[in-house]
Image: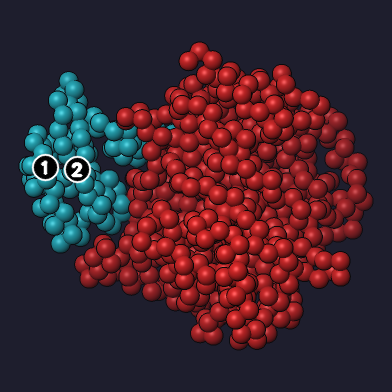
Amino acid sequence: MTATAFRADPGIPGPGTFGSEPDDHAGIYRYDDLDRRFVAERVEQFSKQVTRRLAGELTEDEFKPLRLMNGLYLQLHAYMLRIAVPYGVLTTTQFRKLSEIGRKYDKGYGHFTTRQNLQFNWIKLEDTPAILGELAEVDMHALQTSGNCVRNVTTDQFVGASADEIVDGRVYAEILRQWTIAHPEFTYLPRKFKIAIMGSDSDRAAIRTHDVGVIAKRNEAGETGFTFYVGGGLGRSPFVGKLVREWVPEQDFAAYLEAILRVYNQYGRRDNIYKARIKILVHQLGIDKFKAEVEEEFARLPRPKFTLAPEIVEGIRARFASPGLERLPAESAEFERSKAENVEFARWSTVNLAAHKAPGYAIVSVSLKPAGGIPGDITSEQMDTLADLADRYSFGEIRVTHAQNLVLAHVRKDDLFDLWRQLDAIGLATANIGLIGDIIACPGLDYCALANARSIPLAQAISARFADPARQQAIGELGIKISGCINACGHHHVGHIGILGVDKRGEERYQITIGGDATLTTAIGDIIGPAVTEEAAVDAIDTMVEIYLANRTEGERFLDTIRRIGHGPFKESIYAAD
Amino acid sequence: MSFRAITGNRLRDGAVVFYNDEAGWVERLTGASLYEDKATAETKLASAKAEAEKERLAVDIYLFEVLVEDGKRVPVTIRERIRSLGPTVRTDLGKQAAA
């Protein structure tokens, strides 16, 4: 153990000393030998479990929880392997490995999820040990992607790059990864546990829809602290996370989370899977009682063991290599000229770029939502080329967003036009980030064993209907989210327009909600009427867009108009004939 | 006419398989045994499960309904139609791709 290690269990390897050999990849936490040994041991352990299962030494009932702990599910057509992308950040070496696995062991493509992870849909059980072995070669694994544990911690896809960032959430997400990965108290929680962290005033991580949502901030003295929300969640019983503490000092970051999880572990229900999430506990106890329990537990924790010392934070921060950003003028004549000469590039620049903290740089969002395409899918060929582009233009780093898109976080404005042309050549230059075509959709009944209806065909039909990029831009910010069942992996509850697929006597139908919001002004959408067919759902969205356009005032987003005029006009327009 | 058939996923690779009384687990619905009455189907299901666990052949085994129309077998539910063919959004993949 070294000063930079932060583990719950002394038996678990810590990150050790800062790596002496620099690599080309910025913003990536560097594993050391102890981390690698831990992952390698898990691969070896699971390999033996697979061997024992295939030899009949383990029954399916015995084996199932073991495979789930290693991210391996059984879906409709095959096994599905969910690979962890801690806080959504990947090196191009890792990205190429995912591409290779897709080509070698799957069907040449992968699917990015709303948890910033990657899923392969056609995996063979007998190949899984080899796949996990190959992942371990590039410091990847499938831990914390399934089971009743603390899942992969998610954060802002613009972390460490955004102009509006106050605190770098990666550092604290990594601290939580280390704190929770094999924490003995967190291995058999009542139910899965999802944490998201943001480090700016803009919520790009859907903070209040998580079991615990954390906002990292600074006080007037410049000290780092955290606001904790608890009990958010979607699924069968959606709840908006409630404020449990406005300010937790940095040194108590892990202690406070430990206290929350201990209260959950003690009081969370284990008799009913549908009532086992912390949101139900918070709802049933009431936030005041829950808060009192947490504070009591927090006061009882032995501080030396749980204190997050500044040197630990700095040690972990140091293991995220900073990109070698150049000092550049804020404006790029080349960029401005290219925009003036090429209307498509100008549109893409308006829609897909975000402000970088460093002058002369931009953050590029790469849409995985082509018109009529499958949200979140990417082929191995596209991945290879995107890795090359990330090496050339963005310090060998790629991020995954919870909206199922990718990000190149540090691109020189001078390089944007070249990058855009090359993205366009591989079908990854769709200009629709945050617009109506940027639809979040779960895999639905085309792949998922839990689904009641298909999600993807509806997403394809909607994005095809609104394929015109100029029309999308004119409509402005509008988030459609689609789930194929009440588990809500597609976050439909918080879509500006949410769609839930249901099974009505053997027929697929779609229930529409409006007014949902995944940002800090979190809101659960309201159902506007009976479920409709896929075709009618597409028409209904078109109608609602027209109602919005007819009623909006200057600068008003779809969500703002809904809040101002209410749901009535939208509902009436769709169900008028009924 | 409505029948019942037995399906599961092959243990080694997760592929969708169907049970045939003589041939064991087969990859195509066309090769599955069909059972007209519920009692027979339940009995066959129990033995198929026991055999599959013992021989480590298939998992997640259950009965589903199949209609036979003009000699063609069509699962009653969308879920089973998708399982027997492949994802509707990728017709180049799954059993439908090799059909």
Badge 1: chain ID: B
Location of residue A306 with respect to A71 vertically, above or below:
below
**Residue indicated by mark 1:** B41
Q: Residues within 10 Å of mark 2 (few under 14, many from 20)?
A: some
Residue at the spot 61% in from the left edge and 66% down from the top edge? A291
Q: Are marks 2 and 1 in contact (CB under 8 Å)?
A: yes
> Residue A61 is drawn in which quadrant?
bottom left
Chain that is cyan in the image: B
Is A486 left or right of B64, judged from the image as shown?
A: right
Crowding near the residue tagged with mark 1, few <14, some 14–19, many ≥20 C-alpha atoms within 10 Å:
many
Q: Amino acid at mark 1?
A: Ala
Q: Position of residue A477 (x, y in %)?
A: 70, 34
Marks 2 and 1 sit apart, C-alpha to C-alpha, by: 8 Å
| Labels 2 and 1 in the same subunit | yes
Q: Identify the mark nearer the N-term, 2 or 1.
A: 1
- The residue depicted at 38 percent of the width and 38 percent of the height is A452
Q: Chain of mark 2?
A: B
- Amino acid type at circle 2 is Leu
Residue A243: name its quadrant: bottom right
Q: Is residue A291 positioned above or below B92 on the image?
A: below
Q: Position of residue A400 (x, y in %)?
A: 61, 52
**Residue at label 2?**
B63
